[in-house]
Image (spheres, rainbow, N blue to C red):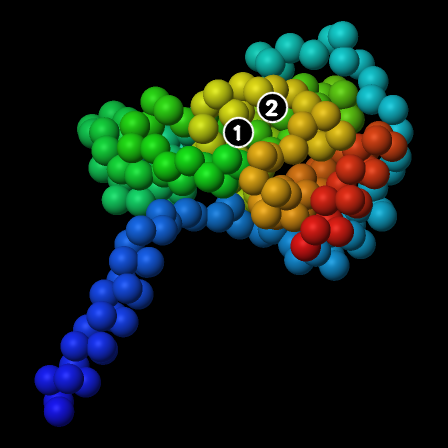
Amino acid sequence: MRRMVLFPLLAVLGAVLLGVLGTPASATPPNIPSAATAASRLAELTVAAESHGDTYDRSLFPHWITISGTCNTRETVLKRDGTNVVTDSSCAATSGSWYSPYDGATWTLASDLDIDHMVPLSEAWASGAWSWTTARRQSYANDLGGPELWAVTDNVNQAKGDKDPAEWQPSRTVFRCTYARAWIQVKWYYGLTVDSAEKNSLTTMLGTC
């Protein structure tokens, strides 16, 4: 009798473990607000047309600075967001597994991943960062305290480029709620503006939460 009960229990346990192990772990950047808080913060953002776009230069945002020891910002995010990440003496990831929430792909080579700025640097520039000091722009470009930096599939990040949510959204529709909440948090925290189309798209995305 015990043996008959044990086999179903083992089968259930095996299925549970398979489900857990088969689902790639994914770290989530900190301080993503709830949908309600994000909606409130979106309402607080100043709506304005983008400006100064023709004066943008990526070098105005010093990024991938040293965070600790030999680890720079990119390497720190790869360690944070990966599973079983192994690094060498220069902090380069030599093995591990990374799940890209934008498209649902899993990668085992760090070279297949880009570190995406949730609100792209050029978007930030045109939304108010043009008036910041270089030190503030450096802090923004290397911000590990909020949901600004994400490890994602490289060609997906390249397809996104400098587009805002009115122009590009993750192919995984189930992630769009999180994406909108993170985008709004970054803009709110740094006091950046939104344009009308961007705000409308963010409102629609929050409606999927």
Pointer 1 and pointer 2: residues touching (CB < 8 Å)? yes
**Neighbour tally class for label 1: few under 14, some 14-19, many 20 plus, Cα within 10 Å:** many
Q: Residue at x 87, y 37 (%)?
A: 46
The C terminus: image quadrant: bottom right
Task: Looking at the image, tell me whether mark 1 or mark 2 is earlier in sequence order.
Answer: 1
Q: Quadrant of residue 96?
A: top left
- In this view, the residue in front, 124 or 12, is 12
From this view, report whether residue 51 is shown above or below residue 88.
Answer: above
Give residue 167's position: percent from left, percent from top.
72, 25
Q: Which amino acid type corresponds to the residue marked 1 in the rendered image?
A: Asp
- In this view, the residue in front, 52 or 78, is 78
Locate residue 73 relative to residue 137 in the image: left or right. Answer: left
Which residue in the structure is indicated by mark 2? 160
Give residue 74's position: percent from left, percent from top.
42, 29
Can residue 17 be seen here? The reply is yes
Q: Residue at x 48, y 48 (%)?
A: 28
Q: Residue at x 85, y 48 (%)?
A: 43
Q: Quadrant of residue 95?
A: top left
In this rendering, the label closer to the viewer, 1 or 2: 2
Q: Which residue lies furthest to the bottom in this view?
A: 1
Which residue in the structure is indicated by mark 1? 116
Give residue 186's position: percent from left, percent from top.
67, 40
The N terminus: image quadrant: bottom left
Locate residue 84 relative to residue 63 in the image: left or right. Answer: left
Q: Residue at x 37, y 37 (%)?
A: 106
